[in-house]
């Protein structure tokens, strides 16, 4: 993918400028334990609807022993989940969708172009392309290890009916 197609040039990302650490992310994103896929947010630009977060991986990840034995690769679905969590953080921080919890609404044109291994930093860059309050948010995303594009696609977020879900889980 030529550099002109990057949302943000990965060489220009400032990892020293942390906008939100894990505790700040937890205030907005509900995922916990093995489902937390972000370490920090390093850019949150509401004017351009761009947000950049990263996940520092380790050999202790839940997927390392089974995906794949002797050749641990971060599953593509986990890369997509990391992208969804960056989208959710940005949307909730700026109240774009008007909900407490955002869920997956769909994905399109997702491509995996490289590997994420234990010890790598997966950087996710998202740019919201369509915001329909209380209905749906569409974002394009790109994932990088260093400056290598490892995944990209389009993701949609929808408001989840939190009260209805709480009723179901309390039965």
Image (cartoon, rainbow, N blue to C red):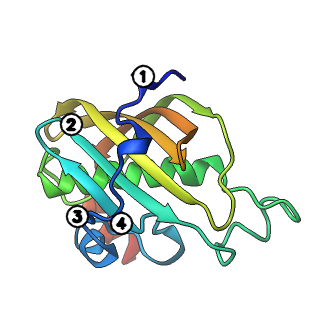
State the residue position of label 4.
40
Q: Which of labels 3 and 2 is toward the front?
A: 3
**Residues under numbered marks 2 and 4 in contact, where contact means CB atoms less than 8 Å apart:** no
Image side of residue 161 versus residue 38, left or right: left
Residue 60: horizontal and vertical position, in percent?
66, 78
First-in-chain label (1 vs 2): 1
Residue density around tag 2, few if under 14, some if 14–19, many if 20 or more, within 10 Å:
few
Q: Quadrant of the C terminus?
A: bottom left
Q: Which residue is at the front of the view, 47 or 35?
A: 47
Q: Is residue 160 visible?
A: no
State the residue position of label 1.
5
Image side of residue 128 versus residue 8, left or right: left
**Residues under numbered marks 3 and 2 in contact, where contact means CB atoms less than 8 Å apart:** no
First-in-chain label (4 vs 3): 3
Q: Quadrant of the N terminus?
A: top right
**Residues under numbered marks 1 and 2 in contact, where contact means CB atoms less than 8 Å apart:** no
Choose top left, top right, bottom left or bottom right for residue 161: bottom left
Image side of residue 56 versus residue 120, left or right: left
Q: Is residue 169 visible?
A: yes
Q: Is residue 121 above or below residue 115?
A: below
Residue at the image position 19 percent from the left and 56 percent from the top = 92
Image side of residue 143 versus residue 57, left or right: left
Q: Which residue is at the front of the view, 54 or 137?
A: 54
State the residue position of label 3.
19
Residue 34: horizontal and vertical position, in percent?
54, 73
> Of the numbered discs in the image, which one, if any, rests on residue 137?
none
Helix, strand or loop at mark 3 = loop
Residue density around tag 1, few if under 14, some if 14–19, many if 20 or more, within 10 Å:
few
Q: Which residue is at the front of the view, 45 or 24?
A: 45
**Residues under numbered marks 4 and 3 in contact, where contact means CB atoms less than 8 Å apart:** yes
> Of the numbered discs in the image, which one, if any, rests on residue 135?
2
């Amino acid at each position: 993918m030529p550099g002109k197609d990057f949302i943000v040039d990965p060489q220009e990302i400032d990892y020293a400028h942390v906008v939100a650490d894990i505790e700040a992310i937890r205030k907005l994103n509900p995922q916990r334990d093995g489902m937390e896929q972000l370490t920090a947010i390093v850019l949150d630009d509401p004017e351009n609807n761009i947000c950049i977060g990263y996940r520092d991986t380790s050999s202790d990840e839940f997927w390392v022993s089974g995906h794949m034995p002797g050749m641990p690769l971060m599953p593509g679905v986990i890369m997509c989940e990391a992208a969804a969590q960056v989208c959710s953080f940005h949307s909730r921080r700026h109240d774009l969708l008007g909900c407490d919890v955002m869920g997956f609404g769909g994905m399109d044109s997702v491509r995996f172009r490289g590997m994420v291994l234990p010890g790598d930093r997966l950087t996710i860059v998202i740019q919201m392309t369509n915001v329909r309050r209380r209905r749906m948010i569409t974002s394009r995303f790109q994932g990088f290890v260093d400056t290598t594009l490892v995944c990209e696609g389009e993701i949609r977020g929808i408001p989840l009916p939190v009260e209805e879900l709480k009723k179901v889980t309390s039965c």
